[in-house]
Image (tube, rainbow, N blue to C red):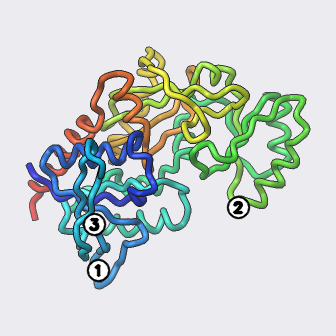
Amino acid sequence: MSLAVGFQMDPLESLDLAGDSSYALALEAQRRGHAVYHYLPSALTLRDRRVRAQARPLTLAPESGQPFAYGAWLTLDLATLDVVMMRQDPPFDMAYITATHLLEKLQPGTLVVNDPAQVRNAPEKLFVTHFPDLMPPTLISSDRREIAAFREQHRDIILKPLFGNGGADIFRITPEDENLNALLEMFTRLYREPIMVQAYLPEIRQGDKRIILVDGEPVGAVNRIPPAGDARANFHTGGYAERAHLTERDREVCAAIGPSLRARGLHFVGIDMIGDYLTEINVTSPTGIREIDRLNGTHIARDVWAAVETKAAERRNMPE
């Protein structure tokens, strides 16, 4: 089955293609005979009830000196596509939310991965709170008294922006640290949203495990190890990849959240585990598949496209 696939994502020129998950997904789509188009989120246009974008056909050749090439510009009616892969990186701001509203208008004819309404309703650090029994002790608040009381109880804490990404502005506050008030002032200047505060998990020194789920089932994992002197394991902040296996606890967590992911149309998801705790559920633009494939000999893009093709076929066979 040949599909017409649009990749809504950042410019390829700005990406590290050797480690980029979106590039791997586009490459596998091309390998399977699908027509691939690329456009930027800022290219989305709604007019006369049609969602269009200025787009270009995309050809990929990773072994060549030119790993990708664009065709001529065209005005692409997104309703004529079988699949749209919503793959732009956060921040999860009003521009991101607006894009979900526009893509929602393509349904049910065009399959959007992940479901845009559910992406809008499931921001990473808030969606995980639907599973409180799986999380570390957590507070979401702007109230300094609440934050101070949480610190008094748990002593060693982590501060995170509620809609941040890539490890930016994540801070550990130890019991002796005198910078809490200064950090809260900084968060107030930079963000209007409440702050996420969590108990520090010493297990982070053994890694922050990224697990990829396809249609609610785990297909691979990678352990992200923080650099010395840093409590953040994100690859963007210097964390490095280490081979990981799924533990019994990992599988328990995946089994607990899998039905909810499937019900919401969240077909391609990355979750983060520190020790036995679930810390985030990433639904916007999950990454890590290149590292998992390299370390484990898997082919996660193939798993993703097998699921997407099944869903697209179901939509083709829907009655008019």
Task: Tell which circle, 3 or 2, labels the residue nearer the N-terminal end.
Answer: 3
Residue 209 in view here: yes
Q: Residues within 10 Å of mark 1 (few under 14, many from 20)?
A: few
Q: Amino acid at mark 3?
A: Leu
> Residue 34, position in %: x, y?
15, 52
Residue in the image at 27% along x and 40% along y: 304
Q: Which type of secondary structure does the marked residue at label 1 adopt? A: loop
The residue pinned by badge 3 equals 106
Q: Secondary structure at mark 2?
A: loop
Question: Considering the image in quadrants, where does the C terminus appear?
Answer: bottom left
- Measured along the vertical axis of the image, is residue 281 above or below residue 294? below
Residue projecting furthest to the top: 248
The crowding category of the residue bearing disc 3, from other C-alpha atoms within 10 Å (few below 14, some 14 to 19, many at least 20), is many
Q: Amino acid at mark 1?
A: Arg
Q: Is residue 256 left or right of residue 169?
A: left
Q: Secondary structure at mark 3?
A: loop
Residue 13 position in % (x across, y down): 41, 57
Label for residue 49? 1
The residue that mark 2 highlights is: 192
| Dot 3 or dot 1, earlier in sequence | 1
Circles 3 and 1: CB atoms closer than 8 Å: no
Q: Position of residue 103 (x, y in %)?
A: 34, 65
Whole-number angstrom distance, CA of label 3 to CA of label 1: 10 Å
Residue sitting at 74 percent across and 39 percent down?
Answer: 171
Measured Cα–Cα span from mark 1 to mark 2 = 33 Å
Left-right relation of 234 to 318:
right
Amino acid type, label 2:
Arg
- Can you say whether 123 is above or below 39 in the image? above
Mark 3 vs mark 2, CA separation in Å: 31 Å
Residue at 47% of width from left, 31% of height from top?
A: 210
